[in-house]
Amino acid sequence: MTNTRLRTYIMHVEDLPGVLNRVTSLFRRRGYNIDSLTVGRTEVPAVSRMTIVMEADDDAARRIEANLYKLVNVLKVEDTTRRPCVTRELALIKVRADQARRAHVLQLAEVFRARVIDIAPEAMIFEITGTRDKIEGLAGVLAEYGIVEMVRTGAVAMLRSAGAEAEVQEQPRTSAA
């Protein structure tokens, strides 16, 4: 029986053009679907951080991690699947909410601690931050009112312990690879 589950990788990479393409091409070539991908700058100049969520068994997860380290611009890879970690996503959800339904929709959103960021005569836009389950829960209860549009970020993750990560050193910029 295979141990397939969602895996979360935190990667530190050089902040250079083409790095994202090389990383995603590795997943494509191996036939893996990326469930979620976020990229952003870090506290270290010239270093970006990628959070990638994918589904894989233990063997595939080890191979992916090993192959990621073979990419020249990858500085560090951590499979946080079995480590204490905080993971969050952000979603904006536009839902039909005329004057008659608005109070009830607001009550539902309040239960999930979603913020109203826009109100129009026939719709409202909510912002929610939390786990995947929390976002899907709010989307589920708002679906009966009619979700007009929804957009979600990918997951961002951070290990809980302050000493859990080795320091990532600033990398000198090289010419485009």
Image: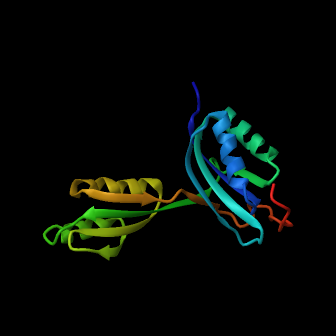
Task: Looking at the picture, tell me which residue is in the foreground, 112 or 51.
Answer: 51
Query: Which quadrant does the C terminus fall into?
Result: bottom right
> Along the horizontal axis of the image, is 176 left or right of 22?
right
Residue displayed at 29% across by 58% down: 148
Residue displayed at 82% across by 50% down: 72
Q: Which x, y percent locates residue 87?
A: 55, 59
Asked where in the image residue 68 lies, by quadrant, the reply is: top right
Residue displayed at 71% across by 40% down: 64
Residue displayed at 71% across by 51% down: 78
Q: Which x, y percent locates residue 51?
A: 63, 55
Residue 141 sits above or below residue 26 on the image: below
> Is residue 83 visible to the viewer in this orientation of the structure?
yes
Residue 154 sits above or below residue 123 on the image: above
Asked where in the image residue 137 lies, by quadrant, the reply is: bottom left
Question: Which residue sits furthest front?
Answer: 176
Question: Which residue sits furthest top?
Answer: 1
Task: Looking at the picture, tell me which residue is in the foreground, 52 or 85.
Answer: 52
Asked where in the image residue 160 lies, by quadrant, the reply is: bottom right
> Is residue 110 visible to the viewer in this orientation of the structure?
no
Q: Which x, y percent locates residue 90?
A: 47, 63
